[in-house]
Image (cartoon, coloured by chain):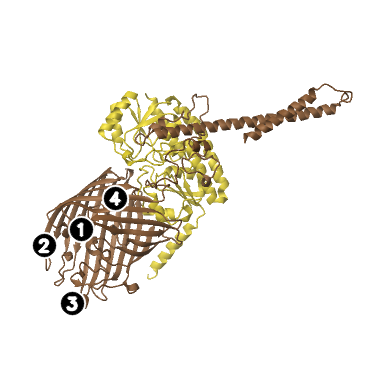
Chain colours: A yellow, B brown
Amino acid sequence: MKHTAPLLLTSALLLTLGSTAHAKLQVVATLADFGALATQIGGDHVDVTVLAKPTEDEHFVDARPSFVVKLRNADVLIEGGAELELGWLPPLLQNARNEKIEIGAPGRVVASQGIILMNVPVGATRAAGDVHALGNPHYMIDPIIAKTVAQRIAQSFAACDGANAAIYDTNYAGFAGTIDTKLQEWGKAMLPFKGASVVAYHDSWPYLAHRFGVTIDTFLEPKPGIPPSPSHLAEVIEKMNARKIKAIIVEPFQNRKIAEKVAASTGARIVDAAQYPGALPNTETYVALIDALVSRLAAALGEQ
Amino acid sequence: MNTSVLFQTILGLALLSVGAASAQAPPAGPSSAPATAAQQTGDLQSLKAQMLQMQTGLRALQAEHRREVADLKAQVQNLHRTIANLRGTAATPGASAAGCAEPAPATSSDAPFPTGDASVVAAPAARGPQAAAPAAFPTTDASVTSAPPAAAAPRLTGPITIAGGARSVLNISFDGQFSAATSSQKNLDALEVGDHDPQQRGFNARNLELALDGAVDPYFEGFANVVFKLDNDNETSVEVEEAFMQTTTLPWNLQAKGGQFFAPLGRVNQQHPHAWDFVDAPLVSGRLLGPDGLRGTGAQVAWLTPLPWYSQLSLAVQNGNGGTGYSFRNGGDDGIFYGRTTFDRRLGGVEDLVFVPRLENSVDLSPTQTLLVGASGAFGPNDTGTDARTEIYGVDVFYKWKSAHSEGGWPFVKWQSEALMRRFEAGRGVADAFPVGETFDDWGAYSQIVWGFRKGWTGALRTDFLHMEESAVTDDPQRQSRWRLSPNVTWFPTEFSKFRLQYNHDFLEANHFLGSDDADSLFLQFEFSLGAHAAHKF
């Protein structure tokens, strides 16, 4: 009995050491969209861990201590950058003590790098709410941008796991090809609604609007991150009636009741949308998510 | 680039015309008349080759031209977007989207939907991530000379950005915390135990905090928290609460820090008042660790163990002197601590330092629930006797549930509890002037629950209990056993401001010198944060 404790500890240590000597590339993605791309490109050669839940507000994720351990064991970290994870990633990285995922290392993918962000504010002031000084970080919803991010991920995987470089490259090419094909489908589905206006709860959708030619410039939030006020909602309702706006996009973590009220006074339809694969039913992959978004949006707009 | 293509084409055309001229030239003399069929075939072949070369040249020219047009188009789109961004203010984020150049979708159902878009990806697709330019920085010369994106370009001559993020070398923030207080106890400073707590009726400004942090170099990160506070005479005092450097690249999962910092004793002791869920410090922390908590100048090593869950073992060593080393080498007010005239003990050797070991473990109970459990201690000498020592033991537990559908971090429930035990050997003071030496076994605990019931709103309740060992000889009001009940409600208009209304009911137990007493207090705390909002640790 006396030797049980040291024995347990030793076996625990051995187990851990054993698991760190893994063959698979250990990938941590801050958000589920990066995780879905990583799975697509890495296939069986990677273990993907996603930190934020696809249904929660990605700006306010708790820096859970278990994330420190995940980051400590990571070969590759994929983050959005552009201040998206500013509120929770830095303290995790301070504690992770992992050189492999330092800024500049091949194991660190900052997905926003090289992406031209939309809506870069001229003067970033918090009087305007939760404004992102570097531009709107919800860029992954644009499939063309997703292709570039996928390529970055493939390049990082290839750099960290040279033996499977060709596989990652092939998987990336396959993904890009699928996107190119699906874009024809999505473009066709959205074509009848070119120029249509849509209301959203939060300004998460400029890239979707830009890609498919819809206008999403009215929001239930008076300013980003500021809860809807009755006077602002009255203005939105007035605007919706005047412009005959018939769809309101709501994300899983947003207050659907408020959207329902607005919908009731305007006859608009609520589009339950999400930015992250897995947040809506049967949307585990990136393509499935965009499929769902396009079909839901087209259905809502097609009803009028 | 295309000059060479052009040159080739001109060359091709020139060759062709020469060839054509020679082919079309009529026989100029008898010597040329007997031209053989073989010669003719050769001429034809060279002509064919020349034609082909010309064709290739033209095609290359055409492709080059197409590329250039596409490039220019992309540039124009970029410029449009830049202009739209410049026009659109932060208050109308949607405006620039509407102001973008012709959006990507095809105009007729026959034309293929575009699968590339040079206006959204700055780096050419073939380029590796290492070589990529900073985000949103166009890679073409035209945009640099005409209108580079306003806010995205790093400017060497510009002011230090305080927005945080990738461009800054330093995060700066200022936090102003104030409270309006009323209490049935006239001398609030006798009732409240923490140095940053409200200390008088009326308005209090006890925590005006300037915080700086950033990467020092590839090896260290630096942190500094300088606190300004106004005392009850409205005199400003400055306190270097924390200022330390911390390693980023030590091997074997180690991390070291050095400087002035909070000792890793328990949970609330390591948090700045800005992160507290209550207006004031818990009784145990104020009375057993000191009004400022336990912090000091020293060094610390922390090891993230290889266990599969979060398990960190740390050891801090600090001087542990003065008011921030309250239970250790602390001379006390006017040289008196717990009735004893204190020694002004200088640091003799390692045994005079304060050692603070801590082990903390955390597991995720479910995707929405996290548990953090810690055990710590602090060991060192105190100034009431030549070999008087203090031992502090503490355990802490923190639980949090946060909805899987949380917006802005709400809704959530947090439960936090800490228990501390202190064994304080009180000597007889200088020249053995105090009649007896005593050993005080003091202990206490608090438990608090915070419920974030709707976005921006929390309700919280804390119970506090403190037991100070009774003595017939040591007459010190700080040694009164007591308990406290504190409900509060907090409204966060955003994460950068808050208003908190808290009620305290204090009950002080009778002891050998003091009668029992109770007090009711009401606080309205208000707070603002400017600049980088340092991410909160869990």
Secondary structure at numbered mark 2: loop
Whole-percent x, y for residue B32 in the image: 87, 25
Disc 4 to disc 3: CB gap under 8 Å: no
Callout 2 environment at 10 Å: few (<14), some (14 to 19), or many (20+)? Answer: few
Q: From the viewer's perspective, is B47 left or right of B139? A: right
- Is B329 situated left or right of A163 in this image? left
Is B296 located above or below residue A174 in the figure? below
* Label 3 chain ID: B
In front: mark 2 or mark 3? Answer: 3
Say which of marks 4 and 1 sits in front.
Answer: 4
Q: CA distance from mark 1 to mark 3?
A: 35 Å
> What residue sits right under mark 3 in the picture?
B433
**Quarter assignment of residue B84:** top left
Position above or below: A230 against A243: below
Q: CA distance from mark 4 to mark 2?
A: 38 Å
Other-residue count near label 3 (Cα within 10 Å), few / some / many at <14 / 14–19 / ≥20: few
Separation of disc 4 and disc 1 at Cα?
Answer: 27 Å
Q: Specify the amino acid type for callout 3.
A: Ala
Callout 4: SS: strand
Q: Which residue bears the numbered disc 2?
A: B516
Lower position in the chain sequence, tag 2 or tag 3: 3
Residue A41 showing in the rendered view:
no
